[in-house]
Image (cartoon, grey):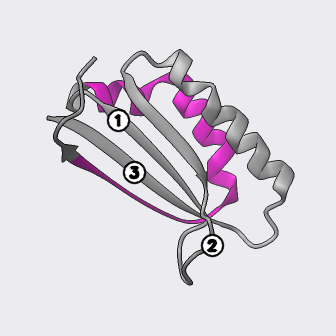
Amino acid sequence: MALRHIALFRWREGTTAEQISRVGEALGALPEAIPELIDYSFGPDEGLSEGNFDFAVVADVADAAGYAAYRDHPDHQAALAVVRPLLAERAALQLEIPGIDRG
């Protein structure tokens, strides 16, 4: 089975649309830079329910080694350097998922 990493962000009060756009630019470069990523998506909450986080990142990798390669990749670390100063709160988990081609 493959692994899915899900990270949820709640932005600090006062975070601007321009700052969130920079987050998107940094994250958008990762699929090309990190070959371990099987699938990768991110974006803002659609606002359909109260209390949701503001933004999510979903990364699918083949296994724990692929997750570690993604987590520790220098380009991912650079993207985190853009994200972290904007965070009021973060939640994350990794779960096994069936039916994903391991690439």
Quadrant in which the C terminus is drawn: top left
The disc at residue 77 is none
Residue on which the image places disc 3: 6
Q: Number of callouts in the render?
A: 3
Q: CA distance from mark 3 to mark 1?
A: 9 Å
Mark 3 and mark 1 residues within 8 Å of each other at the beta carbon:
no
Q: How packed is label 3: few (under 14 Cα within 10 Å), some, or many (20 or more)?
A: some
Q: Nearer the viewer, residue 50 or 93?
A: 50
Q: Secondary structure at mark 3?
A: strand
Name the chief secondary structure element in magenta: helix
Q: Secondary structure at mark 2?
A: loop
Residue kind at label 2, given as amino acid type: Gly
- Boundaries of the magenta span: 66-95
Which label's residue is closer to the chain start, 3 or 1? 3
When the figure is inspected, residue 77 is found, relative to residue 83, above or below; the finding is above
Classify 10 Å Cα crowding around label 1: few (below 14), some (14-19), many (20 and above).
many
Image point (63%, 72%), residue name: 47
State the residue at coordinates (45%, 53%).
7
Q: Which residue is mark 2?
A: 47
* Residue marked by disc 1: 60
Magenta span contains residue 88: yes
Amino acid at dot 3: Ile
Q: Position of residue 43 (x, y in %)?
A: 61, 50
Image-quadrant location for residue 3 = top left
Whether residue 79 is in magenta: the answer is yes
Q: Looking at the image, is mark 3 or mark 2 earlier in the sequence? A: 3
Contact check, label 3 and label 2, Cβ < 8 Å: no
